[in-house]
Amino acid sequence: MPDSKSPAVQSMLNEQAKQRESAREGHLDKGLEDTFPASDPVSATTTSIPAGRTDPDEAARVADDPSFATQGDYPLVDAALAATGEKSSGFDHDVRREGLDGLRRDAGRVADSMSEVAEGGVHLAKSQVRGIWTDVEARIRDRPLTAVGIVAALAYLWGATR
């Protein structure tokens, strides 16, 4: 049976090999030289986020494609509409204005609704805090020595950890 490793295991082994190689190349020494004198610990940083396209041929093709530069503000939308046979400039100006006005009204309503929901949440939170506080006050009044003992123990623990 051949020794087949999952892609995750292969990726981990590749990453470990890269780390060993970077240690041999002296990245930590360079990090020490770049940060000296400083109070921060020395570290060689590498990013795991890819920068740009991973396929250089595709990146060059997109960069050299004149259709992306000559089209309107939204070239991909224009391309999608062209593929379906529709035209982006085929809308009547008044229809677009009415649509935009409707969207603005809807956005205003949503903003008002969200404001009301947030305000209601604040009132609910305040009432719950008031209820908890009155419950705590009632328990303190019922057993004042127990409350003093608990506070003293907490103060001791807090002071001991500082």
Image (cartoon, rainbow, N blue to C red):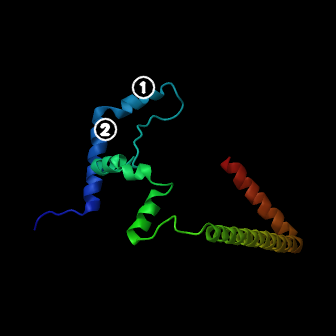
Horizontal side, residue 161 vs residue 51: left or right: right
Name the disc covering residue 75, or none: none
Image quadrant containing the N terminus:
bottom left
Label 2 – label 1 distance at C-alpha: 16 Å
Q: Report the number of numbered marks.
A: 2
Q: Is residue 116 left or right of residue 104?
A: right
Looking at the image, which is closer to me, 118 or 81?
81
Nearer the observer, 104 or 4: 104
Q: How crowded is mark 1: few (under 14 residues within 10 Å), some or many (20 or more)?
A: few
Residue matched to label 2 = 22
Q: Which amino acid does label 1 sit on?
A: Glu
- Percent x, y for residue 12? 29, 54
Which residue is depicted at the point 44% across and 67% down? 81
Of residue 31 and residue 105, the one placed in the foreground of this image is 105
Residue 115, image x and y in percent?
76, 68
For mark 2, give the secondary structure.
Answer: helix
| Mark 1, secondary structure of its residue | helix
What is the x, y in percent for residue 37? 50, 24
Where, by quadrant of the figure, is residue 114 drawn? bottom right
**Callout 2, which amino acid?**
Ser
Q: Earlier in the sequence, mark 2 or mark 1?
A: 2
Residue under label 1, please give it: 33
Q: Residue furthest right?
A: 141
Q: Which residue is drawn at 34% across and 46% down?
A: 64
Give the percent coordinates (x, y) of residue 105. Answer: 72, 70
Q: Which residue is drawn at 80% across and 63% down?
A: 149
| Residue at the image position 65 percent from the left and 69 percent from the top | 94
**In the image, residue 158 above or below residue 138:** above
Front position in the image: 88 or 45: 88
